[in-house]
Amino acid sequence: MNPLIHSWPGHEPLAAAIASRVHGEIAPVSLRRFPDGETYVRLMTLPKDRDVILVCGLEQPDDKVCGLLFAADAARECGARRVGLVAPYLAYMRQDARFNAGEAITSRTFARWLARAIDWLVTMDPHLHRYRALDEIYPIPTAIASSTTPIARWIVENVAQPLIVGPDEESAQWAAAIAGRVGCPWIVLHKDRHGDRDVAVSVPDITAWPGHTPVLIDDIISTARTMAAAAQRLRQLGAVPPVCIGVHALFCGDALPTLRAASPGVIATCNTIRHQTNAIDVTSEIAQAAADLHARVQTAL
């Protein structure tokens, strides 16, 4: 039977795109809070002998995870064959090591929680720092959709003479890939982080590219301090206001006004998280990755 696809609010277009690729049925899920804050979940279509695909971004994860786990468990108890999760943004990837005694390595703990509830996982550009791949912590089939092509396409269509700027040394491979698709030069910055909102950035010599517009690209815009510091430094060196691009638009607290003050140029983000800066549509890439992994899991059984 065709899979059932349950979408959390805000992800209806992505759910529809997945449904068209897997010949699935969009099925409503009822989510609400009791007066004491507990979460109520009801799958409105029973999934007996069917696959279930949950579409739920995990920004603000502590508000969503209980409902997601409840839905996955309800699907299994109601006879679902397999439960997959499409999470455009995957939370709890930041803490990938124990820097101080007693710290929780939350990326590993969170992965164990999700892996017990679901059979496969699709996300876009997770924050892989000390991990080389998701399967280092997720013992289930996973797939990563890439934003590289849609970002490169947007740059070609919107920026004349771009210079791709990666936020730190770890972004070199990503910056190079986007620049290769655009056909433009690229550099990476050196970043010293002294705290969540205290970042110092050094910029290499940019005089070799006169007339180019810097295009700052980062996977996550959270407090925006890294991108704002980089934008300020570039302007001090005589560059035009840079274009700022982020994959996941978290924009915590005063992040957006901080970035706009530092760089009055264009700010564009992918639509993995709904935000006023969304300008780059990555729906097709995520939906195709979900369809491909769903088919692979089906074939393996």
Image (tube, grey):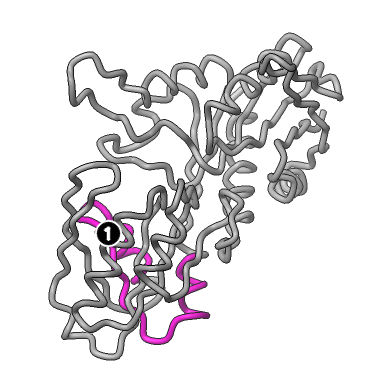
Decide if residue 6 is on the left or right side of residue 153: right
Residue 146: x, y in percent? 47, 53
Give the residue pinned by disc 1: 167
Residue 293: x, y in percent? 58, 37
* Residue at 37% over, 26% down: 107
- Residues packed near mark 1 inside 10 Å, few (<14), some (14 to 19) or many (20 plus): many
- The quadrant of the picture occupied by the C terminus is top right
Q: Depth check: give the residue in front, 197 or 119.
A: 197
Residue 127: x, y in percent? 37, 42
Q: Is residue 176 magenta?
A: yes
Q: Start and end of the magenta stretch? A: 151-180
Q: Quadrant of residue 95?
A: top left
Decide if residue 154 is on the left or right side of residue 104: right
Q: Depth check: give the residue in front, 167 or 18.
A: 167
- The quadrant of the picture occupied by the N terminus is top right
Q: Is residue 182 above or below residue 92?
A: below
The overriding secondary structure of the stretch rendered in magenta is: helix
Decide if residue 189 is on the left or right side of residue 122: left
**Residue farthest right in this picture:** 45
Decide if residue 298 is on the left or right side of residue 201: right
* Residue at 16% over, 58% down: 190
* Residue at 33% over, 58% down: 174
Q: Depth check: give the residue in front, 227 or 86.
A: 227
Q: Is residue 30 magenta?
A: no
* Residue at 23% over, 49% down: 198
Residue 295: x, y in percent? 64, 37
